[in-house]
Image: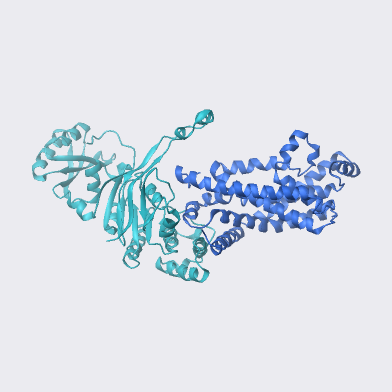
Chain colours: A cyan, B blue
Amino acid sequence: METAVQTFGLTKVFQGYSETRKGPLGWVRNKVRPDRKSILAVDHVDISIERGEIFGLLGPNGAGKTTLVKMLCTLLVPTEGTARVNGWDIHEHPGKVRRSVGVVLGGERALYWRLTGRENLWYFSQLYNIKTQQALQKIQAVLRLVDLTDRADDRVENYSKGMKQKLHVARALLHDPEVLLLDEPTIGLDPKAAKDVRSFVTKLAEEERKTILLTTHYMFEADELSRRVAIIDRGRIITQGPPSELKTSLRRKEILKLSIRSFNEETGEKLASAPHVHKVIQTASNPSTGSVDLKILVDDGEEALPRIISEIVIGGGEILSLRSETPSLEDVFIELTGKTIKEAGLPPPSGMHRR
Amino acid sequence: MTSLAAQWRTFRAAIFKNVRISLTYRPWLINSLVSPVVWIAISIFTYVGIASPAAIEEGFRELTGSPAFTGFLVLGQTIYSFFIAMNWRGGMALERERFYGTFEMILLSPASRVVMVLGEAVWGIIDSGWVIFLTTVIASLLFGLSFNVADPLAVVVGLALTFLAMISLGLFFAGFYVLSRSAGPIAHAVQSPIRFFSGVSFPISALPVYLQFVSYALPVTFGLNAVRSSLLGGGTTLGLSQELIALVAFTILFFILGVWMIRKMEQVAKSRGTLHTF
C-alpha cells in the first residue's frame, strides 16, 4: 500500500519571547512586553497514512492536532523533524505540498462573508491558477458534491454554520488535491449538519479516492469514519491503529459505570487501590443531587465488584446505578492517559484522586 | 516559478474580490467625497483668515515660485488622499485578510503574495481615483483653480510615477503591518506625520532646514512637487527630472523592501504560529 502522508519525529515548540530576544534591546522588550512561555505543542510525532485512507487524529483540545495539521500543510514550520505529503518533503518542496493538499481548518471564518459562496470559490480557484472555464465547471461540481448548489449565489453571511463548513470543504476540493486535511470539520455543527459533513467525508474517500486526515475530539466520529486512528495527548501520539484493534486491546478489561450519592475522596482513594481495579475516573458530578459518576476500569469484574461495593457502602456512599460496558475509544484514551478526553482539554479539577 | 498567466489570475482575482466587497460598503463613498473637500476648506480658510488673498499669493510666490495657493492646497489634498487610499488598501491588504480570517487560506494557495497585494493596491488607485478626481473637481469649482500646464507629458509621467511610488510603499506597509501585529494603530500613526512633512498644506520650504531632511526622505513630497509643478507651475519633464528620478528610486527601493518584508512576515508568522492571531 502506498503511503500518502508520513511524518518523521515532527515536533513544534512555540518559543517564549524572552528566548528569541537578545541583547539590550531584547532586555528592554522583555521588560515592556510580558513573556510567553515556550510550549511544546507537538512532540516527535510519527504517523503514516496510506493512500485512500481516512486516518483519524483523536485528542482533546490543545493536544496538538491543529498544530500537526498546520505543519503538514506548511502553514507552520516544524522545530524538528519532517514530513512527506504526497511524496513531497514539507521543507524542501512546500509549494508542491500546498498544491497536493486541501485544508479545512475549524471555525466559521476563513471565508469572505460579503461575497457569495460561488464568488468565494471563484476567487480561490484563481489563486490556484485554474483556467476560467475549468474553474466554472469545478465550482459547479464541488457545489453539487456538498449540496450547496441552491444557495451558491447567496452571500456567505446568510449561511448557517453547517453551510459555511460545507463551503470550506468545497474550497478545499477546488484544485483536486490528493490529500485532505480536515481539522475538526464538525465542530460547532448541529447533529444534522455534522452528519452531512461526515457522510460526504466518507464519500470523498470511497468515491474520489482522497487520502483524508481527520482531526476530532469526538470519539464516535473517529470511530465511525476512520480506518485507523492515532490518539494524541499533550503533543504526543500515545497509541495508533484501527479503532477495533485499539478497543480489543482493552478486551481483557471491563468498564464499570457507577452513579454514587455521598461519595467522598477517601473512598475514591480506597477504590483506586483495591485489588483488580486498574483506574478510577470521575466522569461527571451533579451538585444538585450530590452524586458523582465514576468509570472504573477493572481486570476482573466479578472479583472486583464485591470489594468496590463494600468500600462505597463503608464510606457512606449510596450506589444509584451500576452497569458494565464494552470498551470504547474513550476508554482507550482513559486507559492511556488516566483522564477523559473532556478533562484532558481542561485544567485538572481538584478533589478526585486519579492515578 | 509561477507563470505569467497565474500572476494575472491572482491580480485579477484580487481586484474582483475588492470590487465585489466595496460594493457592499457604499456609505464609505460619502466619507471619501466629503472628507477631502472639508480638509481643503480648512486649509484655505486657515490662510484667508489671517491674511488677504494677495498677501498669501505673494507669500506662496516667494516660497514656491507660484502664487496659486488654492491649487497648491487642492493638489496637496488630492495626492495625500491617494496616499491615504494606498495606506489603507495596499498597506492593509494582508492585515485585512487576517481580519476576515482568510489569511491562512491565502498563504496555503500557490499564488504570489506580492501580486496579490499589488492587485489590491491597483484597485485602491482605481477605486479611490475617481472619487479623488470628483473631489478635486468639486473643490476646484468651490474654491477656484487655474492650471498652468506647459508640458502634458510631465503631468502624465509625474502622476504615473507618484502612483507607482505609492503602490510600492503600500507593498512595504503590507508586510510591515502584519509583522508589527499592530497594523491599525501604525496605519493611523503614519498619516499625520506624512501630512505634515510632505507639505500637503504648506510649502516645506517654510520648515526649518533640519525638518526638511525628513520631508525629502518621503516619496509623497516628491510626488506633490512633481504634480504641483507640472499642473500649476508650468514645469517640464526635464525640469522635474530630480523629482521624477527620486520617485523612480523610491519605487524600486520600496518594492525591494516590500518583497523582502512580505517574505519575512510569512517566515516569522509560520515559525511563531501567529498567522491567524491578532
Q: Is residue A262 left or right of residue A170?
A: left
Residue B55: % across, % down = 90, 41
Residue A348 visible in the snapshot? yes
Q: Residue at x 57, y 56 (%)?
A: B115
Residue drawn 39% across and 38% down?
A: A39
* Side of B164 relative to A180 (left or right): right
Residue A342 place in picture, x, y as percent: 31, 44
Residue B87 in sight: no
The image quadrant that residue A25 belongs to is: top right
Count of numbered labels shown in the rendering? 0
| Relative height, residue A99 to residue B225 (above, below) | below
Where is residue B142 shown, x and y percent of the image? 82, 53
User: Is B257 displayed left or right of B154 in the figure?
Assistant: left
In percent of width and height, residue A45 lies at 32, 46
- Location of residue A227 (image quadrant): bottom left
Residue lying farthest to the right in this orientation: B54
Q: Nearer the viewer, residue A253 or B1?
A: B1
Q: Quadrant of residue B122?
A: bottom right
List the single residue furthest toward the left. A303
At 45% from the left and 56% from the top, the residue drawn is A95
Residue drawn at point x = 29 percent, y = 60 percent: A2
Identify which residue, A158 or A3, lies in the foreground: A3
Q: Nearer the viewer, residue A339 or B183?
A: B183
Q: Is residue A200 left or right of residue B94?
A: left
